[in-house]
Amino acid sequence: MDEGRAAGQRPTWWSRPRGVSAPRPVAGGAPTAQGAQTPLHGEDPYGTPPYGGPGPWAPAPPVQRPTATPARGGSGVPRPQVTGHAPEHGAPPGVFARYDPWAPPSAAAPSPAGPRTAHIPHSPHTAHPPSPGSPSPRRGRGWTVAAAVVLALVAGTVGGGIGAYAQRHGDIGTVRLSQAPARDTGRAPDSVAGIAERALPGVVTVQVHGTGEQGTGTGFVLDGRGHLLTNHHVVESAGDGGGIRVIFHGGETAAAEVVGTDSGYDLAVLRVERVRGLSPLPLGNSDSVRVGDPVVAIGSPYGLAGTVTTGIVSATQRPVTAGGEREGGGGSDISYVEALQTDAPINPGNSGGPLMDAGGRVIGVNSAIRSAGGDLPRTGTGGSIGLGFAIPVNQARRVAEELINTGRATHPVIGVTVDMGHPGEGARVGLPAGEEGTAVVPGGPADTAGIEEGDVITEVDGVRVRSGEELIVRIRARRPGDRLELTVERGGGRRSVEVVLGSAAGP
């Protein structure tokens, strides 16, 4: 027990822990021996709110009329209910407890020593105490809050259900999705879109049907007279009573006839009549092409007309041979091309279509692809693996002019027969095993330059030659009358000779 505490007296109010209810002494304290009233305890050093002043001298907070409770501790004094309400004006005096904000209303505790009275003046704002049996205001507020929470939950559930139903079935309101406004559709002339917009009207789909065969390829307009350029292997099957139809980008169709073809260059010229509004494609210069230049390929892969793909030039002067022996023993159908290599996707059906530079000019005619199986088909079912090959436009232009003007193309030659079975490096001048005759044409360019049978040609204009096929490719890339410098090996020695290319009619 604390010192100075009388028997049965509770601790001072400031030493009580929070949440424990106990009455506090009223102002005036207990009488002393001299008759003066002294406080029951010392002044509150903490000045604890909400009472303002220290200890028992603090003004009395609002109180209410006490109600009878069972006696406790033998005091016989009923414990007041502390709710913060004041008694009505004129009510009889009673014992009141100091307001305790932490004490529950139903807690009972003995009163301090002796009854005390307090006069509560009437105030128009004084709340009346609830009548006996009426519910507690605090309890009423609890029920109100609970009802509001339940109502909010029900409303939210119902509203969410209605919203989900409306979203699923669209029965409530109309859904409007945001969208960016249409912008100017113009594109820069050197962009892929700009190039495609200008070039597509000049690209056609070529449909060919022959005896038991049919196929689809691509071509493009050369001039306003109706001449079109495509690959030889695209129209080859139309040679035996077949027909050719071309479809323009706008959907117009027209019958086409073959003006001339050349299997050695894998090129063919077609012509359409009575077609107006043709859009010839401008021709560039393949000698200006460099590795890494951007390119655009246009064609009809697998019949999908107007397909545009893009890539770069992967290599130049790539020696490529494609084709093979004709069916029925009709001779060779091999083409020799010093090609432009590109990674722009080229697939079956792209054959004969244009390969264009960043200026929208044709720099090549798409002709062959390397398939995953390792061969180099001009047609077939193999798709692009990023290895496509195009005939340089400089070579295609010369052949097209000859086919239009004479119906046949000429091939540059040096007047020798090359042994394709030579196992070593270079192109050996000689006949295949078992054949008789001469490997060097008397009076031809090679004979004039001093080349003999058995010589091995290792370079053309300083570019190394590894096989007979590469020698043919390098020569076919030139024109008749061009001068070439050949490096020749004979008997372990090397020498350079100059050759003026002759001309031979194509097949």
Image (tube, grey):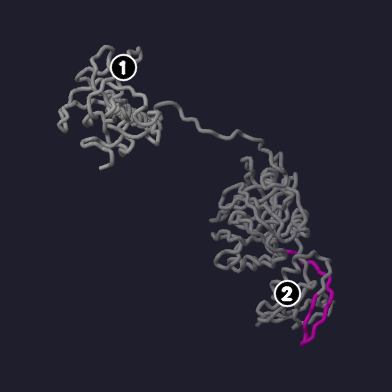
Above or below 3: residue 488: below
What residue would you read off at disc 2? 465
Above or below 190: residue 179: above
Q: Which residues are magenta?
A: 486-507
Instruction: Left or right? Give the position of 165 relative to 140.
Output: right
Residue shown at 63% from the left, 40% from the top: 250
404 or 51: nearer the eye? Answer: 51
**Quadrant of the rendered image containing residue 364:** bottom right
* Residue situated furthest bottom in the rendering: 491
Residue shown at 68% from the left, 81% from the top: 424
263 or 471: nearer the eye? Answer: 471
| Secondary structure mostly seen in the magenta stretch | strand
**Quadrant of the rendered image containing residue 189:** top right
Q: Position of residue 29 (x, y in %)?
A: 29, 28
Q: Position of residue 396 (x, y in %)?
A: 73, 57
Amino acid at the residue labelled 2: Val
Amino acid at the residue labelled 1: Ile
Is label 2 or label 1 in front? Answer: 1
Q: How far separated are the C-alphas under marks 2 and 1?
A: 124 Å
Q: Residues within 10 Å of mark 2 (few under 14, many from 20)?
A: many
Residue shown at 28% from the left, 37% from the top: 11
Q: Is residue 406 visible?
A: no
Q: Position of residue 217 (x, y in %)?
A: 61, 53
Find out whether residue 503 is within the magenta segment. Answer: yes
Find out whether residue 429 is within the magenta segment. Answer: no
Q: State the SS at label 2.
A: loop
Which quadrant, please, contains the C terminus? Answer: bottom right
Above or below 214: residue 331: below
Residue shown at 64% from the left, 68% from the top: 331
What residue would you read off at disc 1? 120
Q: State the SS at label 1.
A: loop
Which quadrant, please, contains the N terminus? Answer: top left
